[in-house]
Amino acid sequence: MSVRTLAALLTRRTRQLPGRPAPGDLVADVRDVRVTLGGRRVLTDVCLEIRAGQVLALVGPNGAGKSTLLAALAADLPAESGTVRIDGRLAADWSPPELALRRAVLPQSAALSFPFTVEEVVRMGRAPWAGTRAEDEDDPAVASAMATTEVAEFAQRSFGALSGGERARVALARVLAQRAPLLLLDEPTAALDLRHQELVLRVCQERAAAGDAVVVVLHDLGLAAAYADHAAVLHEGSVAADGPPGEVFDAKLLSSVYRQPVEVLPHPRTGTPLVLPRRDVQRGEPRP
Amino acid sequence: MTVSAQPPHSPGQAADADTPSPADDANRPATREQRPKPAVPQAVADAALDVAPDKASQDAPGAAPARRRRGRAATLTLGLAVGLLTLSLISAGTGAYDIAVGDIVGSVQHRMGLGGSALDRVGESVLWNVRLPRVVLALLVGASLGCAGALMQGGFGNPLAEPGVIGISAGAAVGAVGSIAMELTFLGDWTVTACAFVSGLLTVLLVYVLARSDGRTEVVTLILTGIAVNAFAGALIGLSVFFADNAQLTQITFWQLGSLSQATWPKVLAVLPCAAVGLFLAPLFARKLDLLSLGERPARHLGVDVERLRLTVVVLVALLTAAAVAVAGIITFVGLLVPHLLRMAAGPGHRFLVPGSALGGAVVLVGADLAARTVANPAELPLGVLTALFGSPFFFWLLRRTRRRQGGWA
């Protein structure tokens, strides 16, 4: 008996496999969540619904609570009050292995203690499915995740030898390989060049079209407007606006939230909102 | 980073360790003179570790495809196993009374009822009462230390974690030494082992709590914690030394320097349960340790119950270290050196690294013990001193390399 079979025997417990959500189904639900970190109230009574088949962009200035909200959704942080439900059940009631089948998380920065190769790192994304029927999908899932994020060409290189942007894509590939119905991505485009920023958001859109729910923290409002079905603007720990980007991205709201005058124009060809800082007005004197 | 308190005198049993019984002494002088010089065993150990070239540093782009790594892991396993068998046979045959390798195999076959033939009376006695328990003990201790090192580095996500460096070995030795000094016998043969285990476990927990902040273990914090723990353990051992009588002193010194010279079958039996449990359970956590290298949160996102895993690893490390320390004293750097060499050769995957380090540790310690017995013949070098002599420079190099890669300690 191999070590792996033995390990599987010893660690096997009844795991409830997730069903495939239909488009529009409620995948995760945040109700009146309040989080305090280090004595500071970071989230105040936040409500958010995350539905299958949609890309939800979380935007807002630095320190608005985007990453904290994502961490609460990932069940990393306990909520002081309020509830986070994933797949219909309180996030805290799921065991870590069950949760790993239901949501995948891309952290803001990717680190690695030991020099694993890119392919080995991506394959780690398949760990939650070990011992289930979906284990057969391991190889195609890894291969397709690496192809999508364009990391296949350096699959055999050590993760530590990669550039920041390459690491970010490898981390994303690992998250995609996990094939969870809820994707939580914390600034996936931060370290990426123009081409790969577009690529990552196209991937988000494709995953949503395939029926997954995607929550993505973004700083580039133009990207959010172009790719998200839904946007939530966070401001000082609460949701200032929530809805389709065309409605939410209002010059007045964004100017006050970001404390920087902005203008929102429709793209001359596509009509997608473009959010641009206004450089012709003095800082601190926003004009409506 | 072994205990700093210097012993008043060295262990007295060193030179007569090979004496089976007074009756056999008549046969010894003649054989002692004719004994050929053995090959330097450390070189054999090194050769065994060199089966795969360790040039494949992790920074070489495209140099270590996963498949080649897997092939290399298989080659390494085979090489280490062959090396271990060879070294064990050489070690069992070498000493004041030389026994040919063929005769050893014959005698073992004979005892197992598979043909072969017994040696003469002296030979049988030397082989079965002196040499074999010692070789088996070296094997168990080495495997425990190597495996504990690999587990600890994986569990702490830090390549510098090692039971000896961060003070676990010294902590376990406090229990062992204390039980000797206080003449505790509540568990018979297992008393010292049990005390070593309990104090080892407490030390691991202490280091675990002290060295972590925000769910991470910084290198500096870990090493500094190690200094503090080693210093405190050294003081406690010093205190035991101060209150001990002469007979106890000899025993205590043995723990401080690390040695296998008092190997007997009961000792092997005393350490076997701890070592066996640790060695069999450790590989089960290999895959989770791989995931842990992504960091604590990402590991949890992939379904690992991180706190439970860390606690399990800590208990296993205490079990393995205590097993080793209880019979062999403080032997440092095996748990640091072996996993590192294997990681360079076959990649960081713990599915190979954890059992591989056990095998590698056994090879190194059987080799080192052979060296300790033979290089300064007829005197015997303390084993812990020997491993520290080779391990410390390696540790320097590792520190420098880690610092270079991190760009300072911050």
Image: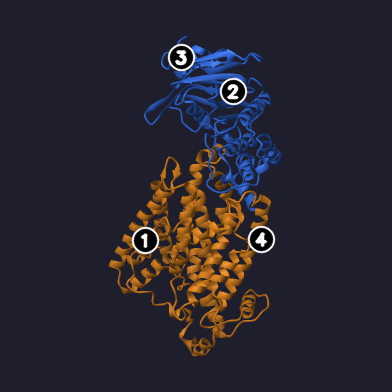
Residue B12, how many percent across, how many down?
39, 77
Q: Are discs 3 and 2 both within one chain?
A: yes
Q: Is circle 2 on the same chain as circle 1?
A: no
Decide which of tag 3 and tag 2 comes sooner along the chain.
Answer: 2
**Marker disc for residue A281:** 3
Q: Colour of chain B?
A: orange
Q: Which residue is mark 2?
A: A223
Spatial separation of the CA atoms under disc 1 and disc 4: 40 Å
Whether labels 4 and 3 share one chain: no
Q: Which residue is mark 4?
A: B75
Say what amino acid the circle numbered 2 marks. Answer: Leu
Label 4: element kind = helix
Could you tell me the amino acid type at mark 4?
Thr
Chain letter behind tag 1: B
Residue position marked by numbered label 1 in the rendering:
B174
Q: Are marks 1 and 4 in contact (CB under 8 Å)?
A: no
Q: Nearer the viewer, mark 4 or mark 3?
A: 3
At label 3, the amino acid type is: Val
A287 with respect to B181 (left or right): right
Q: Quadrant of the C terminus of chain B?
A: top left
Query: In terms of depth relative to the viewer, which is nearer, B124 or A122?
Result: A122
**Can marks 1 and 3 be said to lie on one chain?**
no
Q: CA distance from mark 4 to mark 3?
A: 70 Å
Q: In the rendering, what colour is chain A?
A: blue
Q: Is residue B273 above or below residue A57?
A: below
Give the SS element for disc 2. Answer: helix
Q: Amino acid at mark 1?
A: Val
Query: Could you tell me how far apart the alpha carbons at marks 2 and 1 are, in whole angstroms?
Result: 61 Å
Of badges 1 and 3, the one in the foreground is: 3
